[in-house]
Amino acid sequence: MQSSTVYKDRALASLKGNWDKGVIATVIYIVIVGVGSNIVSAVFGPKAGTALSFVWTLICIPLIWGFYFYFLRVARKEDLAFGHLFDGYKGNWQRIFTTTALQYIYIFLWALLLVIPGIIKGFSYAMTPYILKDNPELSNNAAIEKSMAMMNGHKMELFILELTFIGWILLGIITFGIGLLLVEPYMMTAIAHFYEDLKEEQAAPAV
C-alpha cells in the first residue's frame, strides 16, 4: 500500500479534465439524497416527515452505491456518463440494497456498544460497495466479510487517508458547503485508488 499523499496525487491525476463531471455527480447525489430527504420531511411535517424521510433514505441506497461506483470509474478512467450513478437500480438491485442495508445495520449495532467499535467496523466494511461491483456473485454477508478480510491490517491506513481531508472539509464548510463539491470527488477518488491497490494486493500470490 502507498502513502496518503500518493493516493491524493493519483486522485488529482484521475480528476484532471474530469472535475466538472465529479462536481456535477456530487450535486446530483446531494440534491436527490440530502435535499430530497429534507423536502419530504418539510412537506409532511415532523412526525410523518421523519418516517417518510427514512423511507426516502432507504430508496436512495442504490444511488449511494452508485456514487461510490461513479468515482471508481473515475479512478479506472472509464466512461463517466451521469446515468452510471443510477446503475444500482438496474438488474439485481436487491443485492445492492440488502448488502448496503446490512452494512449500515451492523455498523449501527456495533456503535450501540461503544462509538469506537462502530467506527472500526465502519472501516472494516468500507470496501463493500466496490466488492459488490467487482464480484457480482457475492452479496450480503459474503461481500461484507470479503471487505473485512481486505481491510485486515489496513484500517488505520484508510483512517489516516480520510483524516488528511479534514482541513479541506473544514474549508468546504466555511464556504457554506460550496467547497465540499470539490472535496467530495477528491476524497472519493482517492479512496477508490486505495481499493484498487487493496484488490491488487489480495490477488497477488502469497510469497
Image: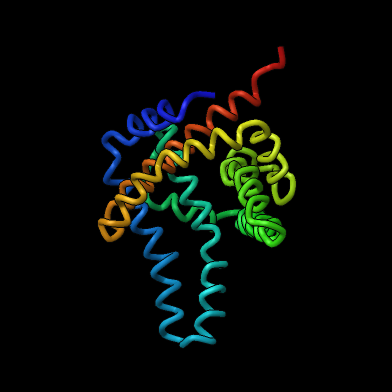
The image quadrant that residue 143 belongs to is top right
- Direction top: furthest residue: 207
Q: Residue at x 52, y 72 (%)?
A: 56
Q: Is residue 201 above or below residue 112?
A: above
Q: Quadrant of residue 75?
A: top left
**Up-down: is 186 above or below 181?**
above
Colour scheme used in the picture?
rainbow
Count up the numbered dots: 0
Return the x and y of residue 71 as percentages of the image width and height.
Answer: 43, 42
Asked whether residue 94 appears in the rendered view, the answer is no
Residue sitting at x 66%, y 48%: 121
Residue 7 location, quadrant: top left
Q: Is residue 17 above or below residue 113?
A: above
In front here: 176 or 201?
A: 176
In the picture provided, is 86 more to the left or to the right than 200?
A: left
Q: Residue at x 50, y 24 (%)?
A: 2
- State left or right for residue 58 relative to residue 143: left
Image height of 57 relative to 185, above or below: below
From the viewer's side, name the closer residue of 46 and 17: 46
Q: Position of residue 112 (x, y in %)?
A: 69, 62
Q: Is residue 125 visible?
A: yes
Between 4 and 146, which is closer to the camera in this rendering?
4
Q: Nearer the viewer, residue 173 or 10?
A: 173
Residue 135, percent across and down? Answer: 64, 39
Residue under the point 33% across and 36% down: 15
* Image quarter hosting the N terminus: top right
Q: Position of residue 151 (x, y in %)?
A: 64, 35
Position of 110 with respect to 97 (left or right) is right
Instruction: Please state, as top left, top right, bottom left or bottom right, where the C terminus lies in the image.
Output: top right
